[in-house]
Amino acid sequence: MFSWKIGERLMVFIHDFDTIKESFKSIDLVYRPQVEYLTFIIGNFHQGLLLANGPYWHSLRRFTLRHLRDLGMGKSRLVTSVQYEASELVNSMKKTAGEAKPISSDLRVAVINVIWQMVASKRFEFDEVQVLRYDNALAKYAATFEWVTLVDIFPSMKSILPRPLLNILTKRNDHEHLMDVLKSHVKTSIDEHAKTLDINNPRDYIDEFLIEIKKEKNSKTGLTLSEKDLIVCLADIFGAAFQTTATTMIWGLFYLAKFPDVQKRMQKEIDEILPNGTQVTLEDKLRLPYTEAFINEVLRYSVINRFILPRTVIKDTKIGEYIVPKDSVIFGFTEAVHFDSKHYDSPTQFRPERFLNDAGKFEAPKEGFLAFGIGRRLCMGESLSRMELLIFLTTLVQHLEFSPPEGETIELESANVPVLNMPNFNQKILISVRKTD
């Protein structure tokens, strides 16, 4: 554990798993700080699922979890939808088989379709303009991401510099464009739902939220939701699914291409358990121990978020052996934990078998694993993400093979994006149709 006064803020970094586990489960570390780079991504700091605090956040999280679970999140009834999207992605990839090219945006669209059908009763076509606009805006944002962190390091810039100059220095226009594209899309979905809303027959999350807004207008609870809250919640959900699960899957495909022995072992297991193209279901999970081990190693090794999303303390608080001053920004250092030899033998090696026991059965990591965070703000979408990773990756490996282009290698170095561990999305990969298909 160490602290670092960065500009005008005291940042505290915790790299020991036991300390992270103990402190992040405490009510004292449930609060989010106001950090500019997250506000740019999500929007209004005081609204939504990721950045809000207090009773508002707790009620909104509980409401969202309840209704998404009722709509099938992480449950077997959602399997058919995930299977369909995985099959459509395979068909799309087959069209460009034999060509060395970057992984297409079709993968990200397929992933977002699963959650968006629960949220808005809609799926996107792979070439739909709306979702491609968001994909392009996200790529532009990622390329300039480091500039927005200047304001977190030196908050006084906002009061000292003229707004036009500040916008130029922080590339704010790129970041606001991303949110404008996303908000425009979700606002259209909300308007369409409002016109056809039947309070007795809610179709999806948007309907449930609109009904809740109507209820609270007539109640005296003191917690009032609005359409703005819904917009930010949808932006949270859309952005998280589009970015994290899809990016983890892309890392997975790069690892398959980089480590052919891993891919062959995974193919062998899948071919034996799911012969003749049998579609994978959640019931097959226990029969696919190496595939499950591969998914967990992808989550450990790729460590999309190098840090758990930051917390703050609203009073002087003891963490470990130290007193951390009020308003400090606290980071759990996920990357340090995932590559700690105390928890993993040869942590810098990609070895799915580390999650298999002597009998060849999958054993979930109990310590030193923070892919979905920890504590009271644990990722709400973990069950859905794991379901998607299982069904998508199994289906892709079942029908396709991934390799480096002839004479080239797959590079696993992270793109230059602070805080996040992003792959080089422009890296080319060769996709081949398996002979068994």
Image (cartoon, rainbow, N blue to C red):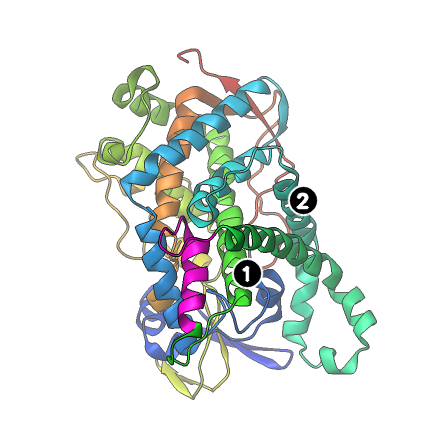
Magenta stretch: includes residue 215: yes
Q: Name the residue: 35% across, 58% down.
A: 65
User: 10 Å neighbourhood of mark 1: few (<14), some, or many (≥20)?
Assistant: many
Q: Give whichever of 100, 195 is nearer the camera.
A: 195
Image quadrant where one finds the C terminus: top left
Amino acid type of the residue tagged 2 in the rendering = Arg
Q: Name the residue: 34% across, 40% down.
A: 78
Main SS type for the magenta part?
A: helix
Outermost left residue: 359
Residue 203: image x %, image y %? Answer: 40, 48
Q: Give whichever of 256, 382 is nearer the camera.
A: 382
Q: Which mark is residue 207?
A: none
Residue 142: image x %, image y %? Answer: 65, 52
What residue is pinned by disc 1?
231
The region drawn magenta spans 197-216
Among numbered discs 2 and 1, the one appearing first in the sequence: 2
Q: Is residue 219 above or below residue 306?
A: below
Q: Name the residue: 45% across, 63% down.
A: 308
Asked if one can make out residue 202 in the rendered structure from this viewpoint, the answer is yes
User: 10 Å neighbourhood of mark 2: few (<14), some, or many (≥20)?
Assistant: few
Q: Quadrant of residue 372?
A: bottom left
Mark 2 vs mark 1: give the one in front: 1
Name the secondary structure under disc 1: helix
What residue is pinned by disc 2?
133
Asked if one can make out residue 378 in the rendered structure from this viewpoint, the answer is no
Magenta stretch: includes residue 214: yes
Name the secondary structure under disc 2: helix
